Image (tube, grey):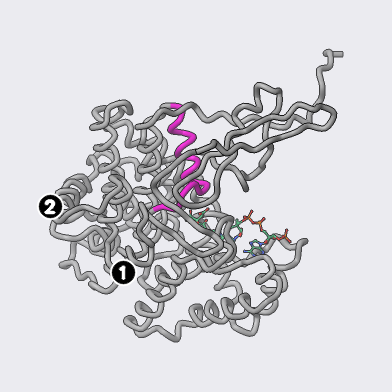
Amino acid sequence: MTKKVAKLTLEGSNEIIELPIHEGTIGPDVVDVGGLTARGMFTYDPGFVSTASCESAITYIDGDQGVLLHRGYPIEQLAEKSDFLETCYLLLNGELPDPAQKAKFANSIRYHTMVQEQLSDFFKGFPRNAHPMAIMVGVVGALSAFYHDSLDITNEEHRRIAAYRLIAKMPTIGAMCYKHAVGQPFMYPRNDFSFAENFLHMMFSTPCEEPNISPILAKAMDTIFLLHADHEQNASTSTVRLAGSTGANPFACISSGIAALWGPAHGGANEAVLTMLDQIGDESRIDEFIKRAKDKNDPFRLMGFGHRVYKNFDPRAKVMRQICDEVLEDLGVENDPLFRIARRLEKIALEDEYFIERKLYPNVDFYSGIILKAIGIPTSMFTVIFAIGRTPGWISHWDEMISNPYRIGRPRQLYTGHARRDYP
Ligand code: SDX
């Protein structure tokens, strides 16, 4: 089959530059522009709006159709039929586990959920009101100080054990951030609890009484982790890949992903949605905020709306909205004023020309915050939960890159500063 090429002609020259086109399994083809440097030119794409940074087989998104596939399986089916740990296995290994593989994987994760005891001393250095993401960035990066037996990134076994440790310890460290903030003792993970049940146990149990975790809330928590598990080359995953391309250890790479996720334009949006709903305060004020969201001179954005890729409903938001209905009803707070404001905000925005024209739909963060608040999770912990859910995605992309030929990521620039000049 003839190879597809893109032909580039430059003004003032009759040279035709042929650029190879690569085709994926599904989705857009890519033009390989690597050869342009030899001709003294770069491509220019601030924000990487139309740049494929790598080849990957983990997750596929079709933004126009609102499609999200993990190793080919639609997110709606995984949310309905799978669970978070099985989805972690799928992202890491490329196939769904059989029952024996699933049990072995769950066991491997279970026996890595504890952190080294002296790690709890780190928390003594943080003020009680430290943002939990500030602690997560520090403590997760510091894990590399403990695990010299899993830092040889060229060793597949080291990469695997590092992946298990990170997936297993993120909820433990996340819950420790919360306990530190409320001045309660850290709770150890329990091996008789499932992943999400354990997280809620470490968050809300105390040594004074037997744990009492609602199975409905544990299931909702598990699905929230699952819905956040991976999302192609988003800002934090691209950060993890870039850090990994220098040969940095996996704990440092995941810490860089946590830092990037923290921003309100990315994973920090779920916390920002709740702040916005609190700010709106009443359905009568929605129009005022819709107006502000459209005003170019006003930095206010409708948090939880819009997406670089989705120009349709984020399929995760649809599942999240259904969980929201179920959890609020189960808790008897279906008339929660914030939920009512959110539903009305969504309805108004989806009928407003400004949002329709720009294809701004609710994204994964729009409803997650309302569910987490209903479960009793403080707003400052929302992005920590996003980070716990996203860890298998980050580590799968890191492993996919490191286990294949790769080069250090080193973008160039369009230089618009001073030409050479001599010191006066
Ligand atoms: C996540 O990449 C991922 O996959 C991320 C994520 C993942 O799973 O990893 O899906 C998770 O981060 C979801 C997004 C969470 N962020 C928010 O909810 C914050 C609010 N959203 C916006 O900040 C914005 O929509 C972004 C950052 C999500 C996308 O930014 P883009 O792609 O750079 O889009 P843009 O800023 O160029 O917007 C295009 C237009 C602009 O107007 P015009 O210049 O065309 O007139 O839409 C407007 C923007 O002003 N716009 C909004 C808006 N989002 C975009 N206007 C009001 N409210 C908004 N939320």
Gap in Å between the C-alphas at discs 2 and 1?
21 Å
Q: Which residues are magenta?
A: 230-246
Q: Is residue 240 magenta?
A: yes
Q: Amino acid at mark 1?
A: Glu
Label 1 secondary element: helix
Q: Left of 343 or right of it: where is 299?
A: right
Give 115 or 164, whichever is nearer the viewer: 164
The residue sitting at 20% across, 54% down in the picture is 189
In the rendered image, which residue does mark 1 sit on?
Answer: 80
Label 2: state its secondary structure: helix
Apparent side of residue 1 relative to residue 216 in the rendered image (left or right)? right
Q: Quadrant of the C terminus?
A: top right
Give the label on residue 327, or none.
Answer: none
Q: Which residue is mark 2?
A: 100
Q: Camera-side residue: 138 or 105?
A: 105
The crowd level at tag 1 (other Cα within 10 Å; few <14, some 14-19, many 20+) is few
Q: Quadrant of ligand 1?
A: bottom right
* Residue in front for this viewpoint, 232 or 332: 232
Q: Residue at x 68, y 74 (%)?
A: 290
| Residue drawn where x is 48% and y is 64% of the image | 364
Q: Residue furthest front?
A: 1
Q: Quadrant of residue 41?
A: top right
The quarter holding residue 345 reads bottom right
Q: Is residue 131 left or right of residue 203?
A: right
Q: Is residue 367 magenta?
A: no
